[in-house]
Amino acid sequence: MNPLTTTLTLHLLVCMSLTATSEAAIKMHRARVVVTNYLNGGLDLTIHCKSKNDDLGVLVLHPHNDFEFSFRPNFWGTTLIYCSMSWDSELHWFDIYIDTRDLNKCNDACRWIVQEQGPCLFNRTSNKYDICYPWNQSSMTMKNIN
Ligand SMILES: *[C@@H]1O[C@H](CO)[C@@H](O)[C@H](O)[C@H]1NC(C)=O
Ligand SMILES: *[C@@H]1O[C@H](CO)[C@@H](O)[C@H](O)[C@H]1NC(C)=O
């Protein structure tokens, strides 16, 4: 082996072990999600969240009450947690946790408020709930599945 090849080989080994370390760190990381009812008019929010493997159950949140859960995002970064949210005669769906969307936006927790128009995520830069998303458009199909 000439010196150049040796250096390259060593370099490659270092890169590989760094990758392994950061993957382990991601795997250990626990994510927290907090959802608060911000509907107008004193409405209760009924929320039912699930992932592929877990069902977090049906909860009724009174105005300004919140609900919190934590979990370990999967190794592959494909963790998805979705919720149905309803009040009066309305029923909507929203993906409350998507790794690729949320991982870099949340500090200790991903904090959401739920309003009639849709959920808004807490923005750690502006200190406001100003990262707002529309309800999931495929609501009708998912409603039938459930
Ligand atoms: C968070 O707030 C900052 C400051 O207002 C803004 O520049 C940024 O775009 C916001 N982040 C997101 C993801 O909307
Ligand atoms: C709606 O939900 C489906 C199924 O969970 C998901 O694949 C899709 O990305 C969601 N769309 C939006 C706009 O959130």
Image (cartoon, grey):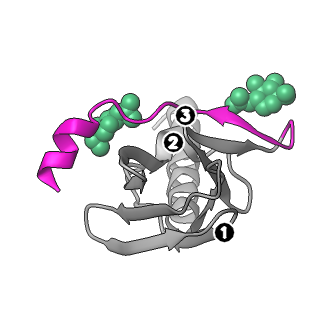
At horizontal 57% and vertical 69% (from top left) the residue drawn is: 30
From where the camera sits, is residue 11 visible? no
- Circle 1 crowding by C-alpha within 10 Å: few under 14, some 14–19, many from 20: few
The residue at which mark 1 appears reads as 65
Disc 1: residue Cβ within 8 A of ligand 2's nearest atom: no
- Circle 3 crowding by C-alpha within 10 Å: few under 14, some 14–19, many from 20: few
At horizontal 64% and vertical 51% (from top left) the residue drawn is: 41
The residue at which mark 3 appears reads as 117
For badge 1, the amino acid type reads Asn
Looking at marks 3 and 1 on the same chain, the residue that comes earlier in the sequence is marked by 1
Whole-Å distance between the Cαs marked 3 and 2?
50 Å
Q: Position of residue 129 (x, y in %)?
A: 74, 42
Q: Quadrant of ligand 2?
A: top left
Check if residue 10 falls in the magenta segment: no
Look at the image and tell me in which quarter the N terminus lies: top left
Q: Where is residue 81 in the image (x, y as percent from the top left)?
A: 39, 56
Viewer-proximal residue among 22 and 116: 116
Q: Which region is colored magenta? A: 125-146
Check if residue 143 falls in the magenta segment: yes
Q: Position of residue 39 (x, y in %)?
A: 61, 50
In the rendered structure, the answer to whether residue 141 lies left or right of residue 88 reads left
Say what secondary structure mark 3 lies in. loop
